[in-house]
Amino acid sequence: MAKKEKNFFERVFDVVRKIPAGRVTSYGAIAEYLGSKGSSRMVGWAMNASHTTRGFIPAHRVVNRNGQLTGRLNFPHPDLMEELLNNEHVRVENNQVVDFKEKFWDPNTELRKKKRTSK
DNA sequence: ACGTTGACCTATA
DNA sequence: GTATAGGCCAACG
């Protein structure tokens, strides 16, 4: 009944929206969750569309594999990403998330570890 | 429709 | 540890 055939963007946004506050994830993790592990670029591309897409997309919670804020320059304001992360009690230093490994939130582990009894 | 681009990741040197 | 190359797939021009 539900049309699952959503655009690639919508799928990415859906996962990003599920990221809890104070947590961060990586493009590769989302890509893997979507089923395209090697296509992490598409995730970033979807984020770029978040500008023109309605609804708020916490793209600041999405960083690269190194926990580096690669997309901060792509934000409406360069310092917006870092500011938002600080607002979520996430320490950012040198454009990199501190304790990134501890704050890392993997959709494959968090979302999938639970049985999808009821989506 | 074809070619380029892209907020990445992995591997090799 | 830095630099370069390849791959991946969808959207944009």
Image (cartoon, coloured by chain):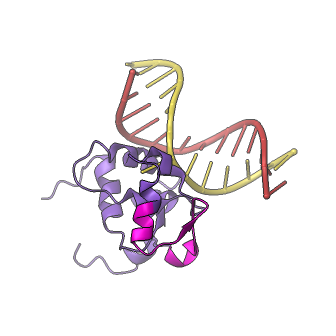
Chain colours: A purple, B yellow, C red
Q: Is residue A92 magenta?
A: yes
Nearest to the observer: residue A54 or residue A26:
A54
Q: Position of residue A94 (x, y in %)?
A: 61, 61
Q: Position of residue A113 (x, y in %)?
A: 40, 79
Nearest to the observer: residue A50 or residue C8:
A50
For residue A30, say whether it is visible.
no
Residue at the spot x=35%, y=60% of the render?
A58
Q: Position of residue A84 (x, y in %)?
A: 40, 63
- Left or right of A98: which side holds A44? left
Residue at the spot x=43%, y=73% of the render?
A23
Residue at the spot x=47%, y=60% of the render?
A82
Q: Position of residue A19 (x, y in %)?
A: 36, 69
Image quadrant containing the N terminus of chain A: bottom left
**Residues shaded magenta:** A83-103
Nearest to the observer: residue A21 or residue A93:
A93
- Does residue A98 lie above or below A12 as drawn? below
